[in-house]
Amino acid sequence: MVHPPQRTALTGPALVRLLARLGETDVQASQQPLADRLSQWLGWTDAIALSTVLSAPAPAVGRVTRSDGEDEAQRCLSLRSALSKAIVTDAVLAPPRPSARYARGQQGAPVPEAPELPADFAVFRQCYLALQQKMEADIGDMRTRLRNRLAGQSPEMAKLAALDALMERSLSVRERNLLSTVPGLLARRFAALRKATQAAEAEAQAQTTQAEAQAEAQPEAPPAANTENTPGSWLATFRKDMQSLLLAELDVRFQPVEGLLAALRTR
């Protein structure tokens, strides 16, 4: 008996695992060394620039300013917290609920919530792109700040700062192009969730109609069970998926910052 090949558990950043799950793609871990894969992202001009930086002597540092990096660590922590909060509390991804003060009428009777607005993926796409741009700009500024601090630590740290600046210039375009494809995957996820919900609602409506017809034909039959539909639940699922992707992308974008911070805190 021939058994189908089992799917290998994918390891790596949470962003990769989420993209594979949402895209329902069986992604195999690459057997190619990281250096070889990274070289495919660099053009010949980038390779020459990289070789120049690596082979050049460490630049002289005019004024050495030693630091334990604790102040920058707090700045990084605050930035990451602010970006996470921007994702979690975004009005599109986490629409505000009515407050308890207005959730009930004068007699204490529940007041129905406003119906879910018509779902339009263009709104979610714009939201995702805006949050991506905010992450790129704010993290880029922090990365530049950390490089400037490193450049004043020692000649070796100044060389590391120059290397990071070169890698950012060389890889930023490729990184931006790859991350810009995420909204396309989300668009397919959005459409699939909506289609599945519409099909389920149509089936439930057909069953209700059939039960009502049987009840009219046989009055003594017990009433059909009430099937409660929640049309907005698929949007809640989609919003959660989108938030998870953005938070995972934040983790990936923050890795160079964490590397520079670790170097700054090395004595």
Image: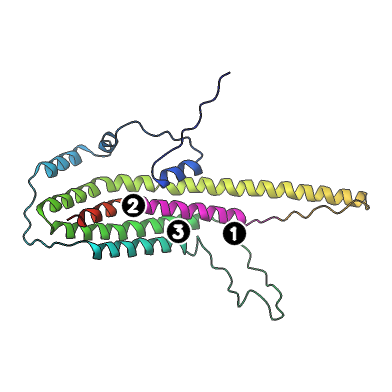
- Say which amino acid is labelled 2: Arg
Q: Position of residue 8 (x, y in %)?
A: 46, 33
Q: Is residue 249 a member of the stretch shown in magenta?
A: yes
Image disc number at residue 153: none
Q: Which residue lies at the image location 63% right of the left edge and 67% below the top edge? A: 114
Residue denoted by label 3: 127
Q: Where is residue 6 in the image (x, y as percent from the top left)?
A: 51, 29
- Say which amino acid is labelled 1: Pro
Q: Residues within 10 Å of mark 2 (few under 14, many from 20)?
A: some
Residue denoted by label 1: 118
- Mark 1 element type: loop
Residue denoted by label 2: 253
Q: Give the range drawn in magenta.
A: 229-252
CA separation in Å, label 1 and label 3: 16 Å
Task: Give the foreground label among 2 and 3.
Answer: 2
Q: Where is residue 244 in the image (x, y as percent from the top left)?
A: 46, 53
Q: Which of marks 1 and 2 is nearer the N terminus?
A: 1
Q: Is residue 255 a member of the stretch shown in magenta?
A: no
